[in-house]
Image (cartoon, rainbow, N blue to C red):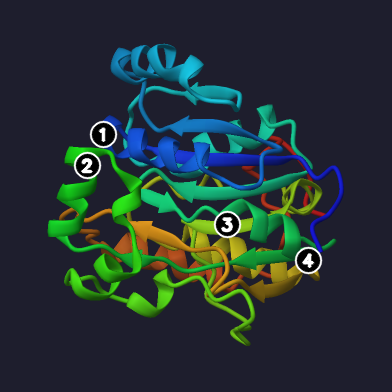
Amino acid sequence: MIQADLKISLIISVYKNIDFLDIVLRSAERQSYKDFEVIIAEDNDGREMADFLALVQNRYSFDIMHVFHEDAGFRKTRILNKAVNVSTGDFLVIIDGDCILHRAFLKEYARQAQDNTCLFGRRMMLSKKLSDTLLNTRDLNRLHLWNILFSGNRKIEEGIYLPFLRSFRKKGLKGCNLGLPKELLEKINGYDEDYEKPWGGEDSDLERRLRLAGARFKCTKFLTIQYHLYHPILPREVTPDGLDFIDEKKTSTEWFCRNGLQKNSNSK
């Protein structure tokens, strides 16, 4: 059952790719659930994104906020925390700016939302052919069942909305498709901003600290459907000092990060 009066803050992390963001925003406009705001969390500070958002703001029925900072390397965790701090919703849904949303995406997050529970979903990987078609036409009606099944996509089972099925997966949080009460993320002081390199690990760190804080987890596979636009995979070279950093974080028993939403805070 959808929670009454649940305002969602949809946080979209982006880095420069306006073409992708444009179609993601179009998919947000098509949501069957309407009580939400959008916060663009830009790990960059170029004028192009601000100009684009100023141009399209009146095109949409939802409010759009834009937070950004200097482009000084991989600082996704920092800009996500900035977005959380300006959000006004009671429930946060966090996605990447290359993931098109199914019409029922936010409806299912609102329906599944529970206290002290982190919801996490998956994404279907669109082929280059279908991604190019969507980007060229901006026609989301092309995401119909035939194209989903027969356009060379991967992880097709992740792209079919099956609201009566349930996944019993208990772990494997993905930073591109997750939702949780804002107070739960505040409890652990948000994302750990010590993650400043593209080594990975920031999502598993968030999951680890939420578990240490006593949070429950629920997988929303088949419900919160996303379609990931094709793009070349950027390499993430993990150096020896990066491995040491990640290993040290993984063995920590602290769930309240010191370098998070609030700075200079004591561990709880």
| Cα–Cα span, label 3 and label 2 | 21 Å
Residues at badges 1 and 2 in contact (C-beta under 8 Å)? yes
| The disc label shown at residue 52, or none | none
Q: Which residue is mark 4?
A: 213
Instruction: Give the residue type at disc 3.
Output: Ala
Q: Residues within 10 Å of mark 1 (few under 14, many from 20)?
A: few
Q: Which residue is mark 2?
A: 135
Please name the residue shown 70% across and 73% down the image: 217
Please name the residue shown 78% across and 54% down the image: 184
Question: Could you tell me which secondary element the residue under label 3 belongs to?
Answer: loop
Q: Nearer the viewer, mark 4 or mark 3?
A: 3
| Cα–Cα span, label 4 and label 1 | 38 Å
Please identify the quarter of the rendering in which residue 234 is found. Answer: bottom left
Question: Could you tell me which secondary element the residue under label 2 belongs to?
Answer: helix
Instruction: Give the residue type at disc 2.
Output: Leu
In the image, residue 128 sits, relative to residue 12, either above or below, namely: below
* Quadrant for the C terminus in the image: bottom right
Looking at the image, is mark 3 or mark 2 earlier in the sequence?
3
Can you give x and y, in whole percent of width and height, for residue 147 in the image? 25, 66
Q: Which residue is mark 1?
A: 19
Can you give x and y, in whole percent of width and height, for residue 57 in the image? 48, 17
Q: Is residue 240 left or right of residue 247?
A: left
